[in-house]
Image (tube, coloured by chain):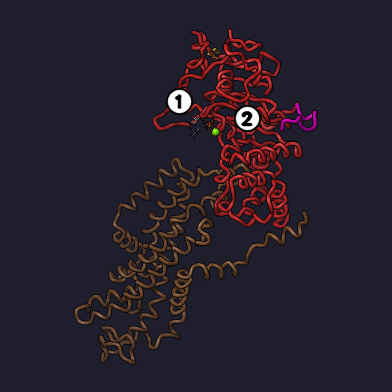
Amino acid sequence: MTTHALDMAVKEDSLFSKFGQWCRRDKRGSASLLVLLVIIGIAVFAPWVAPYSPTEQDYSKMLMEPSAAHWLGTDDLGRDVLSRLIHGASKSVYAAFLAVGIALLIGVPVGLLAGFLGGWVDVCISRVIDTLLSFPAIVLAVAVTGAMGIGLTNAMVSVGIVFSPHIARLIRARTLVVREELYVDAARCFGASTTRLLVRHVTPNAIQPVIVQCTLLLAVALLAEASLSFLGLGVQPPEPSWGQMLARAYMYMEISPEQMYAPGLMIMVTALTFNTLGESLRVALDPTMKGL
Amino acid sequence: MSTASQSSVEDDRNIVTVENLKIHFPLKGGQTVKAVDGVSFQIRAGETLGIIGESGSGKSTVGRALVGLLKPTGGTLRYGDTDISALSASEYKRLRKNYQIIFQDPHAALNPRMTILQSLVEPMEIQGEGTRESRRKTALAALERAGLATEIALRHPHELSGGQKQRINIARALTVHPQFIVCDEVVAALDVSVRGSILNLFADLQEELGLTYAFITHDISVVAHVSQRVGVMYLGNMMELGPTDAVIENPLHPYTQALLSAEPRPVPSDMREDRRIRLEGEIPSPVAPPSGCRFRTRCPFATEKCKTEVPQWREIVRNHRVACHYATPDGRIG
Ligand SMILES: Nc1ncnc2c1ncn2[C@@H]1O[C@H](COP(=O)(O)OP(=O)(O)OP(=O)(O)O)[C@@H](O)[C@H]1O
Ligand code: SF4
Ligand SMILES: [Mg+2]
């Protein structure tokens, strides 16, 4: 055995070339990734991309139809809808990721510990999860936001807290299965610590349903942001967000229904993008699905 | 493995000693499964100890306890002279790597999301051995030693055959240089055509590395082939333990006699028809095992005494122990 020749044969692909392979294999996934990147790009570069200020009011041009000057028309205070949509992207995307991020941050470790340790830890955690799940989500979110103070960040942290028991329950259920797997026992025999077992063996094999759930929750979070902003708990006027725009347009639905199209469409497209990406991610992370 | 192994000085050393080992599993409702209920034996350095018995007799439970996957409910487990329950966590972590297990299901024993290489280097990572580069080299060398091409190192388990996966499990154990390996039905899940080569691999490794095995199987012909001594388990107890030839040619315990007569292949040469016993009835539940001798509900020789008194674990022939009131050195009961 010549070690050199042996090492040559066992060369791992670089991350870059793996990514290239993925793009070629999963056309739908890479298209969604592109859409998401465009949305994020717009969010980041909003001040440069938007034709007008999102908050500048012009009472001479209220609820105007789309025109050359205002591609998507103006809203009830004469603000340019396109500019508000572009500026709103950053708030909405931030809101969705914040909520789901918080949900993961709380839900994953809690669910893992409950499932892996079992016993009274599991009993206590499961009791709390069940209690939280028995409340209507929006009521809970309103209550938590009320306690923490209004504002987009607080509102979305509340939504994240409300989401977290869903995540915890999912991962707990998978962990109960995965912790019994032989490869976990095998790692134990080599002296693996609980942390290693959780990080290297249990989490990667238990996380799959959570990834799918997250993409659904991202879409739900976009709508939750709309609801909370509608109730005045989220984005504060005059700052725009898609949810807030939708909520405001709702009030003028009778006079000018087309006001709802733009934010509604953006929420839908973004939600769909999240879903497609989630499915692609799930497949990409599952070695047994390679080549499908 | 059938060849006597290695340094004769070390042969007297016990690599594993269990005394009165008990493993009970609590059930909902306060009952317990007495999967292993008071078993004592030693495993000598360099030998292969076969463990046979019907399904549910507690073989795997003993095997898992030997490598620390199950905590004894009672009794002691010693590695060499060290009682492992007395060790600190870090001492135990360093010691336990010398005691490995290969499972029946080679696929389930590998993390499906890790490449073979990742699985192979993990034991060394856990033990903090070597550098990234040296671990990789050791892993690839072990892969070759187990009879596989290094090209498969970047594959995932689902891309490989059962035999290949079992070789990977073996290679993974080898990366930390164990002294002792529990082989729990290691070929039972494999294609008949590859069983022989995997058994040969175990034999070669034993010869080369001076390994000690506890070889769990319900295939008596395999046990006869690989082990120097064999223990016979029934319902959580060990019924007989002695040199393989003696146990197979001249079984002393009624259960072993019945087990062997039920087995078509290695019929002992001197086993006349009138000594053939058939196993009748179902194996009782380990939740409520029979009083006295556990085998009495199926034993043709059972008496009142068997009901009330637990048979002693007697050495009635040198190095040959039996748990039966009426066993005699020549194999007759009574
Ligand atoms: N985790 C557990 N919880 C409850 N009972 C268990 C558990 N593990 C094993 N048992 C029970 O303990 C007894 C012994 O099981 P074990 O797996 O050791 O038998 P075995 O001799 O290996 O059988 P087989 O030949 O089928 O592998 C069985 O009755 C089994 O149902
Ligand atoms: S002790 Fe009694 S019941 Fe048990 S094996 Fe011996 S004769 Fe049979
Ligand atoms: Mg078993």
Q: Residue at x 56, y 14 (%)?
A: B311
State which mark lies toward you, 2 or 1: 1
Q: Is residue B56 magenta?
A: no
| Magenta-colored segment: predominant secondary structure | loop
Residue stretch rendered in magenta on the structure = B1-11
Q: Which residue is mark 2?
A: B77
Q: Chain of mark 2?
A: B
Q: Is residue B106 left or right of residue B44?
A: left
Q: Position of residue B188 (x, y in %)?
A: 58, 37
Chain B's shade in the image?
red
Chain drawn in brown: A
Which of the pair A206/B160 is nearer the observer?
A: B160
What is the CA distance from the residue labelled 2 to the residue labelled 1? 23 Å
Residue pushed farthest left?
A: A254
Residues marked 2 and 1, same chain: yes
Which amino acid lies under the numbered mark 1 shown in the image of this protein? Val
Which of the pair A215/B243 is nearer the observer?
A: B243
Q: Which mark is residue B140?
A: none
Q: Secondary structure at mark 2?
A: strand
